[in-house]
């Protein structure tokens, strides 16, 4: 199961032979769970992210659907996010990262924060 997170989660499911209709059902089920308020951030994170966004451009790059993430950010009271680039907008996190980097000058610092091995590999 953990190996599914070594790269793009949805590509991992596909590589494991999970039919597309089941992958879509998993995605829809996650959206249902997220909309119930059952998914919660660590207690201090909404304030930390909002404060960071006051002074920095923050872009969420995810394989989850954009609407799910935007809904969670809103329900958690997180504001100031510049954009959410979900898997429905572009499947490749690498291409999404590259598109964000186009807006930075050579002397700008850009940080990638991830929670899976796949995120770090895609960031590299």
Image (cartoon, rainbow, N blue to C red):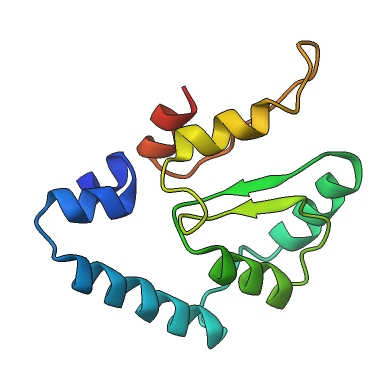
Give left or right: position of 112 versus 54: left
Q: Residue at x 46, y 78 (%)?
A: 31
Q: Quadrant of the N terminus?
A: bottom left
**Residue 97: % across, % down:** 56, 33
Q: Is residue 98 above or below residue 81?
A: above
Q: Is residue 83 above or below residue 72?
A: above
**Residue 11: % across, % down:** 26, 49
15 or 5: nearer the viewer = 15
Q: Residue at x 23, y 49 (%)?
A: 12
Q: Quadrant of residue 117?
A: top left
Q: Is residue 109 above or below residue 44?
A: above
Residue 92 seen: yes
**Residue 123: % across, % down:** 49, 28
**Residue 45: % across, % down:** 70, 58
103 or 31: nearer the viewer = 103
Q: Residue at x 38, y 78 (%)?
A: 28
Q: Is residue 93 above or below residue 39?
A: above
Q: Quadrant of residue 109?
A: top right
Give left or right: position of 84 versus 24: right
Give left or right: position of 95 versus 121: right
Q: Which residue sits furthest top?
A: 106
Give left or right: position of 115 versus 42: left
Q: Which residue sits furthest left?
A: 17
């Amino acid at each position: 199961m953990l190996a599914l997170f070594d790269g793009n989660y949805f590509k991992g499911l596909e590589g494991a032979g999970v039919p597309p209709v089941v992958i879509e059902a998993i995605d829809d089920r996650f959206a249902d769970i997220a909309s119930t308020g059952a998914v919660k951030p660590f207690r201090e994170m909404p304030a930390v992210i909002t404060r960071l966004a006051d002074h920095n451009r923050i872009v969420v790059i995810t394989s989850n659907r954009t609407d799910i993430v935007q809904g969670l950010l809103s329900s958690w009271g997180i504001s100031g996010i510049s954009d959410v680039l979900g898997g429905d907008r572009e499947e490749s996190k690498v291409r999404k990262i590259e598109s964000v980097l186009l807006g930075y000058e050579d002397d700008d610092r850009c940080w990638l924060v991830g929670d899976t091995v796949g995120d770090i590999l895609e960031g590299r």
